[in-house]
Amino acid sequence: MPTADTEFSRSLEIELPLICGAMYPCSNPELVAAASEAGGIGIIQPISIIYAHGHDLREGIRLIRKLTDKPIGFNAIVEKSSKAYEDRMKAWIDVALEEGVRFFITALGNPKWVCEKVHAVGGLVYHDITERKWAEKAIDAGVDGLICVNSRAGGHAGAKTPEELYEELKDLGVPLICAGGIGGPERYIQALELGYAGVQLGTRFIAAEECHAHVDYKQAIVRAEADDIVLTEKISGVPVAVIKTPYIERVGTKAGFLMKRALRHPKLKHYARMYYSLKSIWQLKKANAQGMSYKDYFQAGKSVDEIDKVETTAEIMERFRAAHGGS
């Protein structure tokens, strides 16, 4: 039985090597704080904090700090979709650093500038990847570890199984975090036994009491099975894992001909992604807040197989802790 003491948990000084992943719109301050307070680490998603939950970023971080003094992290999507967005993200990271955040998870773009900022104050940066070529680029940029997004993940899933990803990346010399398909202690322990230094969960924490997701979203997760998870291109232009619903069945899962052309075009792809992103932000916010009769889709991963009830974050984390025999 693997212990909870891994290179990842030691470096962050957390009890369990378990991340409550950043989710739009589900990463409200209370959930982030609860995950850290219960022994893992919660990740701030700035767009969620600001636009879904109505907090100024600094005040949102300070609210989390009132609820826990344990380590928290910050999600930085660093794709250069526009200079305005890049400037905004730089300002957000500065705020997070000023408020004492020292663990950052980057995604989509080149994390080099984030590494420089964070390393200057002794922090750590991990980067989302789905295959080796992106992992090598991230390591060249200076990241300290990798979030290995596999084919069982919710949202933007990878194409490879947890086992395939680990074999592909295990020689890179940095801690690897298994992201995708883990909803309970059994697959958590399997990931650690395989050699991962930790795990990242998203879907499991949507069905947590502290998450402000609508009850319809939580119950959809509780009722769903792995076979109910399908990939749709109609959210962001690339495959996203969602729960199959009557809406998804009605509109289909493939992007139209013109949007596919735009997504491949060197000058148009950023605008096409921006269109999808803005549309999905609005739809997800509405679904999260107003429930089933208003929803278009619910993002979730194949970990729904292990989720059979809504629980407090402390109860969820206690079951993972007990998997180590109480260590």
Image (tube, rainbow, N blue to C red):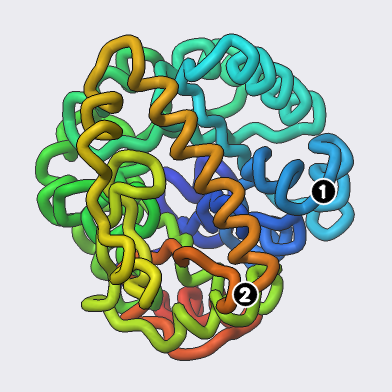
Amino acid type, callout 2? Gly
Picture coordinates of residue 294, whole percent (x, y): 59, 70
Question: Looking at the image, is 270 positioned above or below residue 70?
Answer: above
Q: Looking at the picture, tell me which residue is in the foreground, 263 or 239.
A: 263
| Residue 211 can be seen, yes or no | no
Residue 225 placement, left or right of 108: left
- The quarter holding residue 95 reads top right
Q: For the residue carrying disc 2, how many other residues have a C-alpha within 10 Å: few (<14), some (14-19), or many (20+)?
A: some
Q: Earlier in the sequence, mark 1 or mark 2?
A: 1
Picture coordinates of residue 157, whole percent (x, y): 29, 50
What residue do we see at 52% from left, 44% from top?
279
CB under 8 Å between discs 1 and 2: no
Amino acid type, callout 1? Gly
The residue where tag 2 is placed is 291
The residue where tag 1 is placed is 54
What residue do we see at 67% from left, 39% from top?
46
CA–CA distance between discs 1 and 2? 19 Å
